[in-house]
């Protein structure tokens, strides 16, 4: 078990280093990335009372109602990623989509339009965010969790293929 934690820490440090070295962002933004990764690594995600999962790994995507819903969702990309994950990991990985939406009908229309038949949770009271206080930046509202709901990695694998590679490496080890 300690070897896995050590490997995960090394991988996380490599990803953090990659962000810091190759990013063209300002120093304050780089510091923000480091703070987010440090704060969220190994943090336990709390779910609303009626939620249970028995999977070894989970990808949790939280999305609030700000901005363009269709732009942020990227449903075709998620469908492709889920299909790849199903072929690679069989029953080891579950995807959890928690949406806090002011316009529930808009979200349902988008899900239907893209034939996205994977389960989603429409969190009208925003309970999951109240329990966890997720980062405000959308790119940091996606997490790879272990069976105990502890954060192993942070980042949206649909927005950044290197994050997906990291997720796959962690799950495979």
Image (tube, grey):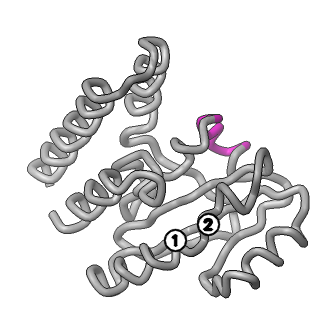
Q: Residue 64, position in %: x, y? A: 73, 50
Q: Please report whichever mark, 1 or 2, sits nearer to the chain's N-terminal start.
A: 1
Q: Secondary structure at mark 2?
A: strand
Name the residue located 37 percent from the left edge and 84 percent from the top edge: 86
Taking depth in this image into account, of 168 and 152 the one nearest to the observer is 168
Q: Which quarter of the figure is the C terminus placed in?
A: bottom left
Few, some or many residues within 10 Å of mark 2 (<14, 14–19, 20+): some
Q: Which mark is residue 78?
A: 1
Q: Is residue 28 magenta?
A: no
In the foreground, 48 or 65: 65
107 displayed left or right of 102: left
Quarter-of-image position of residue 93: bottom left
Residue at 48% across, 20% down? 29
Magenta segment? 130-136
**Looking at the rendering, in which quadrant would you find the N terminus?**
bottom left
Q: Which residue is mark 2?
A: 97
Q: Is residue 99 left or right of residue 15?
A: right
Measured as percent of width and height from the top left, residue 116 is found at 64, 82
> Is residue 135 part of the magenta span, yes or no?
yes
Asked if the residues shown at circle 1 and circle 2 are in contact, with their CB atoms under 8 angstroms apart, the answer is yes
Q: Residue furthest top?
A: 27
Residue lying at the far front of the rendered structure: 24
In the displayed structure, 42 sits above or below 95; it is: above
Q: Nearer the viewer, residue 58 or 43?
A: 58
């Amino acid at each position: 078990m300690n070897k896995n934690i050590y490997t995960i820490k090394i991988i996380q440090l490599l990803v953090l280093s990659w962000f810091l070295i190759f990013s063209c962002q300002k120093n304050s933004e780089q510091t923000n990335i480091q703070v987010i990764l440090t704060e969220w690594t190994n943090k336990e995600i709390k779910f609303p009372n009626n939620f249970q999962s028995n999977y070894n790994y989970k990808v949790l995507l939280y999305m609030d109602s700000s901005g363009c819903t269709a732009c942020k969702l990227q449903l075709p990309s998620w469908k492709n990623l889920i299909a790849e994950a199903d072929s690679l990991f069989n029953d080891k990985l579950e995807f959890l989509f928690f949406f806090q939406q002011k316009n529930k009908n808009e979200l349902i229309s988008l899900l239907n339009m893209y034939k996205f038949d994977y389960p989603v949770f429409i969190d009208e009271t925003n309970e999951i965010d109240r329990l966890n206080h997720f980062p405000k930046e959308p790119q940091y509202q996606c997490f790879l969790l272990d069976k105990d709901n502890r954060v192993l990695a942070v980042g949206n694998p649909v927005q950044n293929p290197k994050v997906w590679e990291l997720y796959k490496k962690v799950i495979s080890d």
